[in-house]
Amino acid sequence: MVVEHFEREVLVERPVQRFEGMRVSWGGIWAGVLVVLGTLLFLMTLGLAVGISADARNVDANAIGTGAVIWSAVSLLVALFLGGMAATRVSMVWERFAGLLQGVLVWVISLVTVIYLGARGIGIMGGSALGIVTGAATGAQPEPTATAWTQFIAVALSLLAALVGAAIGRRRAAVRATEPAQPAAR
């Protein structure tokens, strides 16, 4: 197949290059991971400040623990949504499947990084966002079955947040690509 276009008022024919496979941008994926980690750090420090302020006012410890678990979970979902969106926006992904794959890769790398940091004692989430300490807020030992299902649901929701973010980022980039190009000023 040949594409025709004008270069300096002369018609030039150039062959179109076909790329096999999917175009996944690792630069976009790493940008998404950095957005996830930065957002988590920001939201966790905000939650810590609010929690310490509440503790200084002698608020019930159970309420603070429950609030911390909820805040961690919401922070993780927001961070993964923004990371998935950033991954597809930065790389200007056009294909739906490639965009969703980038969202999945952001999710996997982010969760592995957060779990690794938590295991090394540098946790930015405290583990609660993944549902690991579901009963720690009240001091009760949760039933293992409930803990396992809670953790599964938390991980599934986090994947969904990354996929929705990636789909929204891709959709907005695709809308811009279909707009007519503005003529360059000379």
Image (cartoon, rainbow, N blue to C red):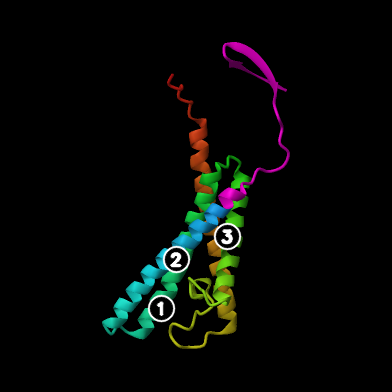
Q: Position of residue 43 (x, y in %)?
A: 41, 65
Amino acid type, callout 2: Leu
Q: Position of residue 71 (x, y in %)?
A: 41, 70
Q: Which residue is mark 1?
A: 66
| Total numbered circles | 3
Instruction: Residue at 48%, 35% (x, y): give it.
Output: 176
- Inspect the magenta stretch and tell me whether residue 124 lies in it: no
Instruction: Residue at 41%, 78% (x, y): give it.
Output: 66
Instruction: Residue at 51%, 31% (x, y): give it.
Output: 178
Circle 3 or circle 1, nearest the eye: 3
Q: Which residue is mark 3?
A: 107
Q: Magenta part of the protein: which range?
A: 1-29
Q: How far apart, in angstroms, are the residues tagged by discs 3 and 1? A: 25 Å
In the picture, residue 30 is in which quadrant? bottom right
Residue 100 shows up from this direction: no
Which of the marked residues, 2 or 1, is nearer the chain's N terminus? 2
Amino acid type, callout 1: Thr
Amino acid type, callout 3: Trp
Which of the marked residues, 3 or 1, is nearer the chain's N terminus? 1
